[in-house]
Image (tube, rainbow, N blue to C red):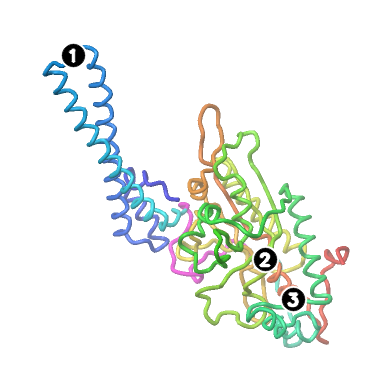
Amino acid sequence: MLDPKLLNKSFDETVANLQKKKVSADLLAQLKDLYLVNKGFKLDLETAQAYQNDKSKLFQKLAKNSEELNNLKLDLANNKNKIAELTEKVRDSEINLEKLLHTIPNITSNDVPFGNDENDNVLLENILEPRIFHFEPKAHYELGENNNWLDFERGAKLAKSRFTVIKGLGARLERALINFMLDHNREYGFDEVSVPIITNSKSLFGTGQLPKFEEDLFKIEGEDLYLIPTSEVTLTNIFNDEIINIDQLPIKMTAVTPCFRKEAGSGGRDIRGIIRQHQFYKVELVAITKQEDSDDILEKMIECSSSMLTKLGLPHRKMLLCGGDMGFSARKTVDIEVWLPSQNKYREISSVSNTGDFQARRANIRYRDGKNNKLAHTLNGSSLAVGRTLVAIMENYQQADGSIEIPEILKKYL
């Protein structure tokens, strides 16, 4: 959640920053006005409460049943009513302030460029050269059906479109990828954690999925529970409403879970195949750090995901996202995009973000630094989307006869 004090201390700078994410200045001005109204009511309330306390001390000094005492009683009764009215105004103004504040995205780092969409992202690095094919490479969905790995019709029969049955060597390869990814992440110092795949609205609010993105979530009818869109939600919220000892930081975690997304608004994108599914496995990285350490941890998380693709022999690149292509909670994001020969282009396979104190403010995650409690910084990243990694292996390792080689690093897992 955006720190509302920024709107009072540095309004013009905050407006300029959030314009990277297409937030209007009018909306921010409205938010600032609500903040100042709430602050004014609080000051009035504190003044009235202090007056009540000071005047109450005079009771013992005044004669019983004197006119002065009666006037004091009347004065304090009126002031008590004023306190009640101001308390209600503070409460109502805070509700209005927070309701609007919850819709405002995170500010961005200074090095995040302006831009509208993925076309304005900045290339940071290319890793490995795409393979030159001496035949026309097939798309993963064709390879999957021909090798009896992917069954789209039966997936739709069991649920609906964008659900797929993965079977045979494809299913074994999916499991091998998961084990390889978790082992790799442990080598980078991330502790493996098993978390629920169902979570409550408080947790989803803490990481920024609610209230803004409710339409993309699968809700359990009659319960304050949802299927998780990513284990970032549950991993981060392990520490909501907690004060962490500074000696425990950084906390680095990895988990594998199925993830569930309605893909609302995705329209007709990636209808064929398993690039954009309602249910998919993802191995996640989450870190909780001291404020001054989060930028360094971000670089280590990017390297962790990138080196995994290098071990798999998959060409990929790192892209610094512009403001217009960034997520709601992110302060800075680097996407890792893998090469897909059938599309002759790079596609996102991992997104690694530093959210600063944005999620920590929403989830109330703090750490004790000496005598002070500070908001932690939280980071998250895909490491990797398992289905998209399977797609990349199928397409990059396909042979002229339609078979698919297995990357050397995965053979021991099979």
Q: How far separated are the C-alphas under marks 2 and 3?
A: 16 Å
Q: Position of residue 51 (x, y in %)?
A: 24, 26
Q: Secondary structure at mark 3?
A: helix
Q: How far separated are the C-alphas under marks 3 and 1?
A: 94 Å
Q: Which residues are magenta?
A: 109-126
| Lower sequence index among marks 3 and 1 | 1
Task: Find disc 3 in the rendering and name its residue.
Answer: 396
Q: Of 387 and 14, which appears nearest the observer?
A: 387
Q: Residue furthest front?
A: 65
Task: Find disc 2 in the rendering and name its residue.
Answer: 385
Q: Quadrant of the C terminus?
A: bottom right
Residue 289 left/right relative to 191? left
Task: Find disc 1 in the rendering and name its residue.
Answer: 64
Residue at figure coordinates x 69%, y 80% from the top left: 158
Q: Secondary structure at mark 1?
A: loop
The picture quadrant where one finds residue 162 is bottom right
Q: Looking at the picture, which amino acid does disc 3 mark?
A: Asn
Residue 95 is labelled as none
Q: Looking at the picture, which amino acid does disc 2 mark?
A: Ala
Of labels 3 and 1, the one closer to you: 1
Residue 344 left/right relative to 83? right
